[in-house]
Image (spheres, grey):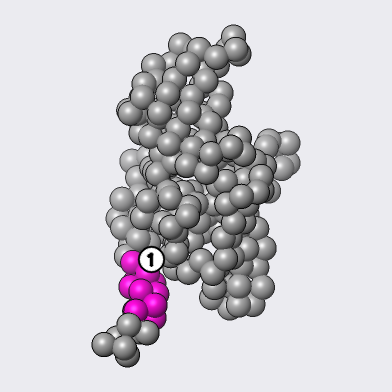
Amino acid sequence: DVVDFFSLAENNEALLNQNAALLAQLKTINSSPDSIALALDSAFVAQYNFKGARIISNSLRFAQNHLTLNKGSKDGIKPGMGVFNEQGVIGRVKSVSENYSVAFSLLNTELNLSTKIKNNDSFGTAKWDGQDSKKTKLLYVPRHVTASPGDTIVTTGFSAVFPEGILVGIIESVDQGEDPNYLDIVVNLSVDFSKAHYVYLVENSQLNEIDSLQKQSEIENEF
């Protein structure tokens, strides 16, 4: 029993890596072609690559929170990769050494996340206000949009970091607020950051090309 107990972490990481490979296969299968005229070889290219890692350090009490992962460049981890788990979005990789990597947490007031209301595809920006670690604000949703408590918030896929449809949270409240143009929306985050231990990292194989083009066009890319 003692031997089995101390082998749990290793077994969990093995399962995590296996699931990451399955995620990559699933994303390929579910890829939607841009048009019916696409050649087969381009329609079935896997745009996203997935890796597994374990959180070895995490902060919750600062305005700019970070987490440290036990995987680095030798494992294929790169700056800019998205970080998530089975509950939803967690953050984005900031820097990488040979054996470790540090990621911005979604609980970081400097990060924006391109999201949408799942049932009507209206998009906005999730941005933490530095207050409650279980909640975030959904910004820039126009007043004419129908948004209700209980609506699901997911990633848009617009940012080129996360695939479309990864869970972010559930709307808690919707108010008119003080801004004459946008609703005041509070979202309950789907991830419990105090209990997150294992994560997946996702790399968009076309991210560098997209980033380069947007910089040329002077476009700010939400992650």
Locate residue 67: give its quadrant. Answer: bottom right
Identify the residue at the far left of this view: 1
Residue located at (37% from left, 51% from top): 87
Q: Quadrant of the C terminus?
A: top right
Q: Nearer the viewer, residue 196 or 143?
A: 196
Above or below for 199 versus 2: above
Residue 120: where, in percent of width, then height? Answer: 36, 24
Above or below for 97 versus 2: above
Residue type highlighted by circle 1: Ala
State the count of labels: 1
Residue located at (65% from left, 58% from top): 94
Whether residue 43 is in magenta: the answer is no
Residue 199: where, in percent of width, then height? Answer: 45, 62
Residue 222 appears anywhere in the view: no
Residue located at (33% from left, 66% from top): 19
Q: Quadrant of the N terminus?
A: bottom left
Above or below for 84 versus 2: above
Query: Which residue is labeled 1 in the image?
Result: 20
Residue 77: where, in percent of width, then height? Answer: 56, 68
Residue located at (68% from left, 36% from top): 219
Q: Nearer the viewer, residue 9 or 62?
A: 62
**Magenta region, main secondary structure:** helix
Locate residue 214: give its quadrant. Answer: top right
Where disc 1 sits, the SS reads helix
Residue 108: where, in percent of width, then height? Answer: 62, 45
The part of the chain drawn in magenta is 8-19
Identify the residue at the far bottom of this view: 3
Other-residue count near label 1 (Cα within 10 Å), few / some / many at <14 / 14–19 / ≥20: many
Residue 99 appears anywhere in the view: yes
